[in-house]
Image: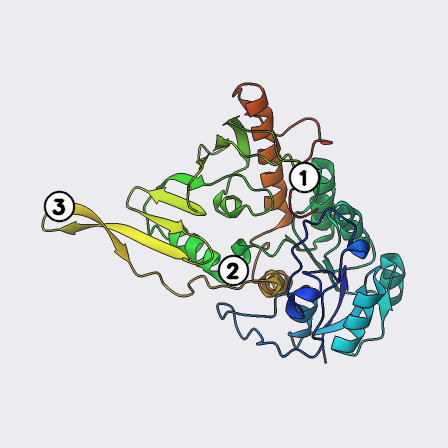
Amino acid sequence: MPEYRAAVIGLGWMGLLYDLASRIPDRFEIEDIDRPTPTLDVHRRIHHHEHPGSEGNPTSYAEAFRDRDEIELVAGVDRDPKRLDAFVSRYGIDAVYRDAVAMFESEKPDLVAVATNTRYRADLTCLAVEHGAKGILTEKPMAHTLEEADRMVRVCKEAGVPLCCGSITTTHPSFARAKALVEEGAIGDVLSLEAGGPFAQHQNWSYFLDSPPAWVVGVGDDDRNESGSDEFRGQGFLVAHDGSSVHFRKGAPGIRLTGSNGEIRFDGIRDGWRWWQEVDVLGKRQRVEVPWPEPQFGFPYGAVYCLTDVMDCLFGDLDEPKNSGRRVAAALEVEIALKQSSDSGGRRIDLPLGDRSLGLRYDWFR
C-alpha cells in the first residue's frame, strides 16, 4: 500500500512532457497554456530508475512519482486540456484539475511538484504547505524575487517540509560523493572554490559552501539581449562568514575545489568528475589524477534525483535536499548582489541585502 499521495501542478516539459515527447525549442516567453504541445507518445516505455547512481529516465516529476512503490500519483493540474488528456491517458488517473486550490482541497497530496511558470511557484509552494504537503519539489528557477524565495524557505522550514528547487546536476548522487570526499579530507584543507558564474538557476557551487555568504564584489556585467533577461554575466568574488571564498570566473569548470593536498573538479554533464591528489613520486611532491569513485555523473539526470532527496529527508536519512530551497535562495541573493556591485564599479556589497523586492528576469525559464 503506497504511503504517500502525490500531485503535479503544471504538466509542461518537466511536469509531464519530458518523458513523452521531443522538446519544442521555444524560449519560454509565453504562458504555459499558449505554448505548443508536441506530439505525445503516452504509451512510451521508460527505462525506470533503479537506485541512486543508475542513469536514465524517468526525468519528469509525474514519472518520478509513479516510479516509487511508496508513492501513489493521484492528480495532475494544468490549464491546457490537451495536457490533462495526456496525463489521463498515460496514468489512467481521472483526477485532473485546472485549478490548484480545488486539487489541494479535494486530493490533499503529501508530495507536490510545482512545475508551473516561475511567478506562480512561491504562492503554490506555500499553498501546498498550508494544505498539509510533507514534501515539495519545484522546477527551476525557484522564484523571481528575494521576497518570494524567503517566503518559500520560511514557510517550509516552519512546517518541517523538505523543499527541493530544480532538477539540476547538483541533485545527482555523485555530488554527494564529491562533498563526502572533501569532508573526509581527500584534498586536504579547502583553499578555494571556483565556478563559471553564480547561476541562480543552476548553482552547483552553493552545495559546497557551508557558511552563509558575507559579501561579494562583481565586475563586467553587461546588458542582456532583447529577451529581457538581466542574469549576471560578469565575474566576481564571494567571501562567506567563515572566511571561505568562491571565485566566479569565466571559463571555469562547472565546479572546482582546490585543497592543500589536491583538487576535485566537475567538468560538466558529458565529462563528469575528476580528482587529483598530491603524492611523493621519486622523492618529489607531484599532483596525480586518481580514479573517481562511484557513482560518476551520468546523463541524463532529472526529477528522480530531486525526489530521492526529498524522500530521504522524510525517512530521516538527509537533513535537506542537495538543491534545497535554502541553498537556491542564497545563490539568487549572491547573483543579485554581484549585479549591484558591477553596476557600482566593483564596490563591495554586504549580505543580506536589505531590499527583498529585488529579483531577476530569466532568459530561458520564466
Q: CA distance from mark 1 to mark 3?
A: 54 Å
Q: Is residue 351 visible?
A: no
Examine the rendered structure and indicate whether residue 333 appears above or below residue 123: above
The answer to whether residue 44 is visible is yes
Q: Earlier in the sequence, mark 3 or mark 2?
A: 2
Q: Is residue 220 left or right of residue 271?
A: right
Of residues 109 and 118, the one drawn nearer to the viewer in this rendering? 118
Inspect the image, locate mark 2, and give the three-letter code of the amino acid beneath it.
Answer: His
Looking at the image, tell me whether mark 1 or mark 3 is earlier in sequence order: 1
Side of 146 relative to 267 (left or right):
right
Q: Amino acid at mark 1?
A: Ser
Secondary structure at numbered mark 3: strand
Amino acid marked by disc 3:
Lys
Q: Secondary structure at mark 2?
A: loop
Which residue carries the number 2 mark?
172
Location of the N terminus (image quadrant): bottom right
**Pointer 2 local density, CA inside 10 Å: few below 14, some 14–19, many at least 20:** many
For the point 70% across and 27% down, the residue is: 355
Q: Is residue 130 left or right of residue 350?
A: right
The image quadrant of residue 285 is top left
Snapshot quadrant of residue 343: top right
Tell me where residue 12 appears, x and y as whole percent: 73, 60
Q: Residue at x 39, y 56 (%)?
A: 273
Q: Which residue is mark 3?
A: 284
Q: Position of residue 154 (x, y in %)?
A: 71, 44
- Residue topped by disc 1: 227
Please, what secondary structure does the residue beneath circle 1 have? loop
99 left or right of 135?
right
Label 3: few (<14), some or many (≥20) within 10 Å? few
